Amino acid sequence: MPSNAFTASEIKARARQLGFDLVGITTAAPPPHAGQFQQWLADKFHGEMAYLERNAEKRIAPAKVLADAKSIIVVGLNYYPGKTRHIARYAVSGRDYHDVMTTKLKQLTEFTGGLWYVDTGPILERDLAQRAGIGFIGKHTNLISRQLGNWVFLGAILSPLELPADKPEGEYCGTCRRCMDVCPTRAIVAPYRLDARLCISYLTIELKGSIPVELRPLIGDRVFGCDDCLEVCPWNRFARLAQFQPRELPALTDFLSWDDAKFKSFFAGTPIYRLKRRGFLRNVCVVLGNSGDKAALPALQKALDDPEPLVREHAAWAISRL
Ligand code: B12
Ligand code: SF4
C-alpha cells in the first residue's frame, strides 16, 4: 500500500506521464465474460496452453489473486510499428514488450499499491480493459481503442485502493466481420471465439512440437505470430506510429546456419528468445517451404543434419514441398 493514498486522477496523470497511452479503472469484481472463458477452456480451444487451465479459478476472480483488491487499473501502450514482414508487429522491435511495460507498471504501482501484471498473471486483461473503458473487444477477441485501433499492449494493476470506476466501453463491430473472413485458418470460429489450436500465432509461438502438416501451408510467410485479423480491422484508421521500430533481419536461409549462441545473442531481450532456436528454425523451415523459392533448397538440405529432430523434420517437409 502506498504511504499516502493517491486519487484516481493523480494515478491517471502518473500513468500518462510514464508513457501509457490509455488508462482506465474498474472494480475487482469478476470479469464480465468469465463464463465464456470457462466455455472456451471446456471446448479445449486453449490447446497446449495448460497454464490457462491451471489458474482458471483465479482468472475469473481477481479477489483470489489479491484478497484485498478493490480496484483494477488497466493501461494500454500503443506499439504500432508500421508494416512488417515475417514477424508479427508486437515482436519486431529489439525489445520485449514485457520489459517495457514492466518498468512503467512498477513505477505506477508506487502510486496504487498492489500487484501488476502484463500477461504474467492470471488476469483476463481484455475483459477488464473493456470494463475499465479503455477499448472494446472486437470479434477477433482483441481490445480495440477508438483512439488508437487494436495495436495496444495491455497491463493491469490489482490495487487495494477504493477508486471510482470508469464507464465500460460499448461494442463497435456492428455488422463487420472482416477479421473472421480473412483468417487463413478460420480460427475465429464465431464472433469473440478464437480456437487457439488453429491460430497461426499459437502454432508459431506457443506450440512446442511439430506443427500439424495440414496447417503448414496456411502459415504462409509468417515466422513468428500473425497479424492478419488485426490488420484488416477498420478501426486501425486511427492507428498512430509508436516508438517501437522494426529492426533489420537477415535472409531467412541465414538463420538455418545459426547455432544456439548466435540465436540467443541476436534475440536476447525480445519475445522471440522464448521460442528458442529449435522453435524458430522450425517456423523458418515452414515459411521457406511455402515460399516457392528453390534457392532455399541448399540451406534446407543442410538443415537435414541439424542437431534438433524438430528442425530436421520441418526441413524435410519444406524440401518436399519445394
Ligand atoms: C493466451 C493468449 C493468447 C493465445 C490465445 C488468444 C485468445 N484469443 O484467447 C494466442 C497464442 C492465440 C494469442 C495470440 C495473440 N495474442 Co495473446 N494473449 C494471451 C493471454 C496470455 C491470455 C488470453 C486469454 O485469457 N484467452 C482466453 C480467451 C477466452 O479470453 P480472451 O481472449 O480475453 O477473450 C475474451 C473475449 O473474447 C470475451 N468475450 C467472449 N464472448 C464475448 C462476447 C462479447 C459480445 C464481448 C464483447 C466479449 C466476449 O470474453 C473472453 C474472456 O475474457 C493474454 C494476456 C492476458 N493475461 O489476458 C495475451 C494477449 C491477449 N495477447 C495479445 C496479443 C498482442 C496477441 C497477438 C496479437 C499476437 C500476434 N500478433 O501474434 C495474437 C492475437 C490473436 C487473437 N486474435 O487473439 C495482447 C492483446 C492486446 C489487445 N489489444 O487485445 C494480450 C492482452 C497481451 C498483452 N498483455 O498485451 N494470445
Ligand atoms: S475487423 Fe470488424 S469485426 Fe473484426 S474486430 Fe474489427 S470491427 Fe470488429
Image: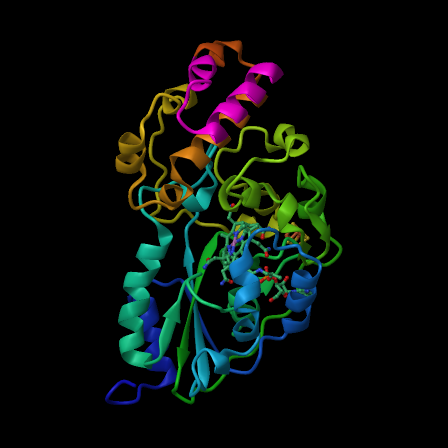
In this image, 145 relative to 162: left or right? right
The coloring applied to the image is rainbow
Of residue 53 and residue 226, the one placed in the foreground of this image is 53
Of residue 243 and residue 106, the one placed in the foreground of this image is 106
x, y percent for residue 26? 50, 79
Residue 127 sits in quarter: bottom right
x, y percent for residue 284? 47, 28
Of residue 64 and residue 132, the one placed in the foreground of this image is 64
Residue at 34 percent of width and 78 percent of height: 11
12 inside magenta stretch: no
Residue at 25 percent of width and 89 percent of height: 4
In this image, 51 relative to 196: left or right? left
Residue at 60 percent of width and 15 percent of height: 320
Q: With respect to residue 290, does 265 lie above or below?
A: below
Q: Let me know if residue 270 appears in the view.
A: yes
In this image, 171 relative to 274: left or right? right
311 inside magenta stretch: yes
x, y percent for residue 22? 43, 65
Question: Which portion, as a residue range, is magenta?
Answer: 299-322
Q: Let me know if residue 146 appears in the view.
A: no
Quadrant (top left/top right/bottom left/bottom right) for the N terminus: bottom left
In the rendered picture of this protein, how many numbered marks are placed on residues? 0
Q: With respect to residue 272, does 45 lie above or below?
A: below
Q: With respect to residue 60, does 78 lie above or below?
A: above
Q: With respect to residue 27, does 290 lie above or below?
A: above
Residue 213 sits in quarter: top right
x, y percent for residue 149? 53, 54
- Of helix, strand and loop, which mostly describes the magenta segment? helix
